Amino acid sequence: MREVRIIRRSPDGQQHDLRMTDLAKALHHGDQPDMVPLARQDIVFVPRTGLANVGIAVQQFLAA
């Protein structure tokens, strides 16, 4: 949650605005200057944790 990315497209859909924010810091300490209100059509990308990657590997192993 420390590297959450917000991808916002321009109205014509050609350009993208990429912002990174530390959501964990915002949740623990309140508003942060890098927090932006979400808009319609925004994409919020939260990277997987190391533990989630291990879980996926175990699921793939068990399925094989």
Image: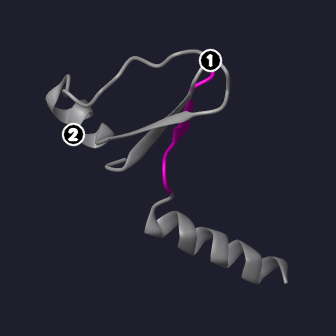
- Do callouts 1 and 2 mark residues in contact (Cβ within 8 Å)? no
Pointer 2 residue: 25
Residue at 75% x, 76% y: name it: 60
Question: Secondary structure beneath disc 2?
Answer: helix
Judged by depth in the image, the label closer to the viewer, 1 or 2, is 1
Q: Is residue 1 left or right of residue 25?
A: right
Picture coordinates of residue 56, whole percent (x, y):
65, 69
Q: Residue at point 21% right, 39% down?
A: 25
Does residue 63 sit above or below 28 in this rendering? below
- For the point 49% across and 54% down, the residue is 47
Q: Is residue 29 magenta?
A: no
**Amino acid on which the number 1 mark rests in the picture:** Pro
Residue 49 location (% of width, % of height) = 45, 61
Q: Residues within 10 Å of mark 1 (few under 14, many from 20)?
A: few
Q: Position of residue 3 (x, y in %)?
A: 36, 50
Nearest to the observer: residue 54 or residue 26:
26
Q: Magenta region: which residues?
A: 41-47
Q: Nearer the viewer, residue 46 or 41?
A: 41
- Farthest residue to the right: give it: 64
**Disc 1 designates what residue?**
11
Q: Which of the marked residues, 1 or 2, is nearer the chain's N terminus?
A: 1
Is 11 left or right of 49, judged from the image as shown?
right
